[in-house]
Amino acid sequence: MAKPFAEQFYKSASWKKCRESFINMRMGIDGGMCMRCHKEAGYIVHHKIYLTPKNIEIPEISLCFDNLEYLCLSCHSQEHNGRKGLKCSFDEKGRPIATT
């Protein structure tokens, strides 16, 4: 689930086009495998530099292929569970679920 400041961005035509193009590129490179583990299919387009209210309007961060990774659910959950203070993981559809 997107943070409130990013909800409009993730609904935008610009992001949807960027995301689709990135996935299509990855499909052509390796069939769309996770860019970290290379064991599972990619599922989520992840920003390496996390989006913030200050950088979300900077296309070189929010819409640049160099800042994107195609990750499987497992690697995406590991990325976010490794962040200090984050108390959630993700289900099979990429939705956050609370952890204790």
Image: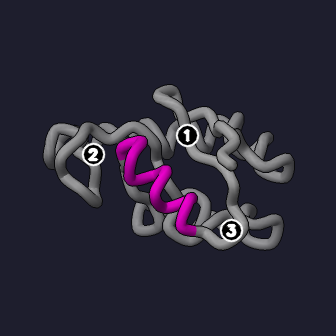
Q: Residues within 10 Å of mark 1 (few under 14, many from 20)?
A: some
Location of residue 30 in the rendering, given as x and y in whole percent from the top left corner: 14, 46
Magenta stretch, main secondary structure class: helix
Location of residue 14 in the rendering, given as x and y in whole percent from the top left corner: 61, 43
Q: Residue at x 41, y 68 (%)?
A: 66
Q: Is residue 85 magenta?
A: no
Disc 1: which residue = 90
Rendered position, 6 above or below 83: above
Q: How many numbered marks, from 0 up? A: 3
Report whether 50 appears left or right of 69.
right
Which of the 4 image quarters holds residue 61? bottom right
* Amino acid under disc 1: Phe
User: Of label 1 and label 3, which has the lower sequence position?
Assistant: 3
Kind of element beneath mark 1:
strand
Q: CA distance from mark 3 to mark 2?
A: 22 Å
Disc 3: which residue = 58
Q: Residue at x 27, y 45 (%)?
A: 25
Kind of element beneath mark 2:
helix
Q: CA distance from mark 2 to mark 1?
A: 25 Å
Location of residue 12 in the rendering, given as x and y in whole percent from the top left corner: 69, 38
User: Of label 3 and label 2, which has the lower sequence position?
Assistant: 2
User: Of label 2 and label 1, which has the lower sequence position?
Assistant: 2
Q: CA distance from mark 1 to mark 3?
A: 27 Å
Q: Is residue 81 magenta?
A: yes
Q: Residue at x 69, y 55 (%)?
A: 87
Q: Residue at x 80, y 72 (%)?
A: 54
Disc 2: which residue = 25
Instruction: Point out the stretch of residues depicted in magenta.
Output: 72-82
